Image (spheres, rainbow, N blue to C red):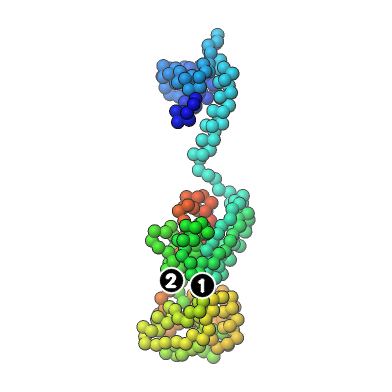
């Protein structure tokens, strides 16, 4: 055998059966071929390995020393190939890998925190890296192999990306429970006159979806504070007359904050999970994406 391309794996299987049986007729029966065909296979094996492989003895055939040596290798090769063709079995408790998740502060609070707690129970050896993606192109981050998974709004996902819808998000108005207008129905005009705090993903922004909705009604609001650190928002609302329009899933986690529906129709968004094609068929990543979906339910 001088060229791997000339090796037929079916010959290896026949060779191992011949070693088991040391009889051409019985080997032919196991392979469901005729005896002449089995004799032809044996001749091909002899040509390939430049050795008689089997010699005749009184009660059948006896393998040569070379055949016995080759047999050990052939059995291992066939076993390895069989293992390659078997679907991988996932054992979450033994899964050891690093999952790099690109997400905004909002998503880290809503999805990443419960995800980490669940994975600590199911797959304690999985390391999780939460990476900021504000102002970055998600597809580029995937192509540069900087993240494995992204949890972002539908605005950041293009049709050609692998993706899954997690949930639809809507906005609520949040203010201190001690705010004079807490539990008071608001008109669109009164709402527009309130002093606002705004969470800005990119920092320094003073307008967003709320402003678009107000402008459609011929109204404007005054944003007094623009934050790009969402952690500061709860204390800011509790200690001032400021109000904020926030994604409902996040707002519901804030302590000591009164929530109510805004008096205007503000366009919400859809939270998506997206990933790169290199992990599309990876069993571990498929399982992890399933866990993310369960957390978001």
Q: Residue furthest top?
A: 58
Disc 2 from disc 1: Cα separation: 12 Å
Judging depth in this view, the residue of 112 and 73 nearest the camera is 73
The percent position of residue 128, horizontal first and vertical second, equals 59, 59
Q: Residue at x 56, y 28 (%)?
A: 73
In the picture shown, does residue 104 fall above or below 176?
Answer: above
Judging depth in this view, the residue of 110 and 233 nearest the camera is 233
Q: Residue at x 49, y 39 (%)?
A: 85
Q: Which residue was labeled with disc 2?
A: 269
Q: Residue at x 46, y 71 (%)?
A: 169
Q: Is residue 248 visible?
A: no
Which residue is tagged 1?
A: 249
Tell whether label 1 touches label 2 (CB within 8 Å).
Answer: no
Q: Quadrant of residue 208?
A: bottom left
Camera-side mark, 2 or 1: 2
**Helix, strand or loop at disc 2?**
strand
Mark 2 closeness class: few <14, some 14–19, many ≥20 residues within 10 Å: some
Q: Residue at x 36, y 83 (%)?
A: 216
Earlier-in-chain disc, 2 versus 1: 1
């Amino acid at each position: 055998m001088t060229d791997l391309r000339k090796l037929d794996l079916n010959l290896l299987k026949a060779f191992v059966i011949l070693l088991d049986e040391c009889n051409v007729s019985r080997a032919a029966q196991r392979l469901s071929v005729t005896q002449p065909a089995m004799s032809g296979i044996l001749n091909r094996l002899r040509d390939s390995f430049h050795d008689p492989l089997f010699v005749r003895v009184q009660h059948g055939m006896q393998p040569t020393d070379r055949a016995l040596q080759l047999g050990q290798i052939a059995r291992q090769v066939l076993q390895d190939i069989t293992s390659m063709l078997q679907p991988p079995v996932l054992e979450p408790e033994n899964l050891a890998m690093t999952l790099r998740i690109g997400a905004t502060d909002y998503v880290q609070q809503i999805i990443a925190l419960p995800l980490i707690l669940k994975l600590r129970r199911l797959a304690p050896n999985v390391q999780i890296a939460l990476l900021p993606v504000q102002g970055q192109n998600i597809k580029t981050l995937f192509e540069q192999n900087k993240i494995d998974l992204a949890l972002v709004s539908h605005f950041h996902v293009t049709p050609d990306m692998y993706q899954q819808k997690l949930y639809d998000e809507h906005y609520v108005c949040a203010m201190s429970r001690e705010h004079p207008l807490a539990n008071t129905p608001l008109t669109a005009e009164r709402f527009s006159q309130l002093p606002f705090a705004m969470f800005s993903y990119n920092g320094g922004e003073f307008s967003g979806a709320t402003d678009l909705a107000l402008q459609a009604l011929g109204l404007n609001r005054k944003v007094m504070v623009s934050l790009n650190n969402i952690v500061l928002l709860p204390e800011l609302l509790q200690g001032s007359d400021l109000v904020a329009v926030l994604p409902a899933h996040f707002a519901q986690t804030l302590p000591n904050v009164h929530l109510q529906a805004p008096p205007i129709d503000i366009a919400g968004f859809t939270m998506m999970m997206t990933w790169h094609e290199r992990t599309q068929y990876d069993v571990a990543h498929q399982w992890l994406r399933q866990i993310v979906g369960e957390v978001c339910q």
